[in-house]
Amino acid sequence: MPIEIKELYIKINVNDSAQSNAAPDKQPGAKEQNVVEMCLEQISQWEQRKKER
């Protein structure tokens, strides 16, 4: 009997002080603001999908 996964939760930790090849932001709070905006956009998309069902 096959197993069907209906929801998958993935948790990650992001360390801001880690070295990366990405260019640093010119404004100190710009990174956090971008992340918050992206999260809010995804949440609104999820809510719209729920309403469509």
Image (cartoon, rainbow, N blue to C red):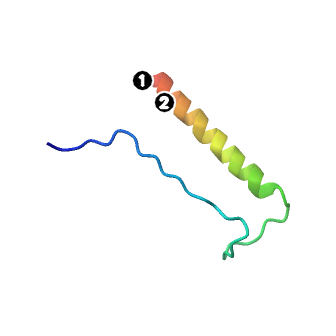
Is 17 located above or below residue 47 in the figure? below
Q: Quadrant of residue 13?
A: bottom right
Mark 2 vs 1: CB contact within 8 A: yes
Q: Quadrant of the N terminus?
A: top left
- Which mark identifies residue 53? 1
Pointer 1: residues within 10 angstroms few (<14), some, or many (20+)? Answer: few
Residue on which disc 2 sits:
49
Q: Quadrant of residue 47?
A: top right
Is 50 positioned to the left or the right of 1 in the image? right
Element under label 2? helix
Q: Quadrant of residue 19?
A: bottom right
Badge 1 amino acid: Arg
Outermost residue toward the left in this view: 1
Badge 2 amino acid: Arg
Is 53 located above or below residue 11 in the figure? above
User: In percent of the image, x 80 and y 56: which residue is there?
Assistant: 30
User: In percent of the image, x 55 and y 35: which residue is there?
Assistant: 45
Is 49 positioned to the left or the right of 15 in the image? left
Distance Cα–Cα, label 2 vs label 1: 7 Å
Q: Position of residue 51 (x, y in %)?
A: 50, 22
Q: Nearer the viewer, residue 53 or 16?
A: 16
